[in-house]
Image: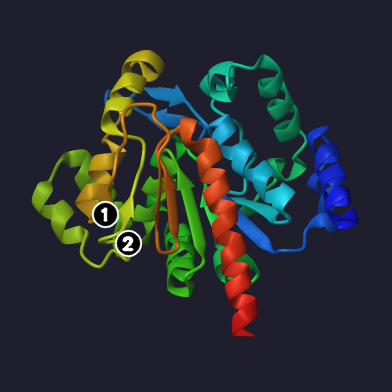
Amino acid sequence: MLRGVVTTLLFAITLCGLSLQATAQSYNKGRVLVVLSSAHELTLRDGRQHPTGFFLNEFAVPVEALIQAGYEPVFANPQGNAVTWDKHSASPRYFGGSEKTLQDTIHFVEGLDALKHPRTLASVHAEGIGAYVGIIVPGGHAPLEDLMTDPDLGQILLAFHNAGKTTGLICHGPVALASSLPDARGFHAALIAGNTNKIRRLAAGWPYAGYHLTVFSTPEEKFAETHQLNGHVLFYPATALTDAGAIVEAAGIWTPNVVTDRELITAQQPFSDKEFSVALVNALDKQKKSTIFQH
């Protein structure tokens, strides 16, 4: 009981803006790799660049849940550059209408010094995934720009898949699964070109083919195009993952939706953040117990 109280107090200190090192002694369940995009701009169909980043609540809510549950988040992205959130996501609407919760979240995220110098995906790939119990990919439009074609991420995801380790992705994050295709860059180019025959050919061999999952739905993306981007994305995430071979399950627009299939946990949009975080921690805890029993 005392241990639980100490862990809770340490988590509260973190929320006050101190670095993750302050809670190092509370991590006792293992490391979780948190993969972020290096992109600060999204390329639209007309060639314009729109400012982007990770979606604030899609990152902060699961990361806070991981810390509180005793897991250590380790941040990584393609370039090892500082990351930031999509300014559109800094709105009370994604925090139950609470301005205070929004400001507390911003304070928490600004206190994560590791976000200023994340690990590179290449270094994680070279090291291997043995030190990690799970991996998550938050959303925001940024993953469309670089994560779904990153070869190091593709190999990292494949390693988690082969090991059956918990893999969580939310909103636009699931598009990163396409990086594990044999020719992810060719698949990406075929999507943009609308080359159906080439898309089908390049989708062969995808390790997540036949998985049930969810992702930011096409109706939601069309809403974002009109009210946020003022332009069109190069392709729709739900179509891309369906073309790759996934069974995409979409709920109604802005309705919380989490889909779990084997080691894979996916969530549809920012309003699924809490349900996603609960499913993520439960899966990690179950995986840990299973590992203990095996030994």
Report the residue marked by disc 2: 208
For this orientation, the residue located farthest to the left is 197
Is residue 232 at least partly visible in the picture? Answer: no
The N terminus lies in quadrant: bottom right
* Residue beneath the point at 22% across and 56% down: 245
Residue at the (23%, 48%) spot, across then down:
242
Q: Secondary structure at mark 1?
A: loop
Disc on res. 88? none
Q: Is residue 50 left or right of residue 207?
A: right
Q: Which residue is mark 1?
A: 246
| Nearest to N terminus: mark 1 or mark 2 | 2
Q: Is residue 111 visible?
A: yes
In this picture, residue 31 sits left or right of residue 126: right
Up the image or down, 127 lies above or below 65; here it is below
Residue 194: % across, % down: 15, 41
Can you tell which quarter of the image residue 141 is in? top left
Residue at image location 83% in from the left, 32% down from the top: 16
As drawn, is 155 to the left or to the right of 281? left
Above or below residue 253? Residue 97 is: above
The colour style of the image is rainbow
Indicate the amino acid at tag 1: Ala
Q: Residues within 10 Å of mark 1 (few under 14, many from 20)?
A: many
Circle 2: element type: loop
Position of the C terminus by quadrant: bottom right
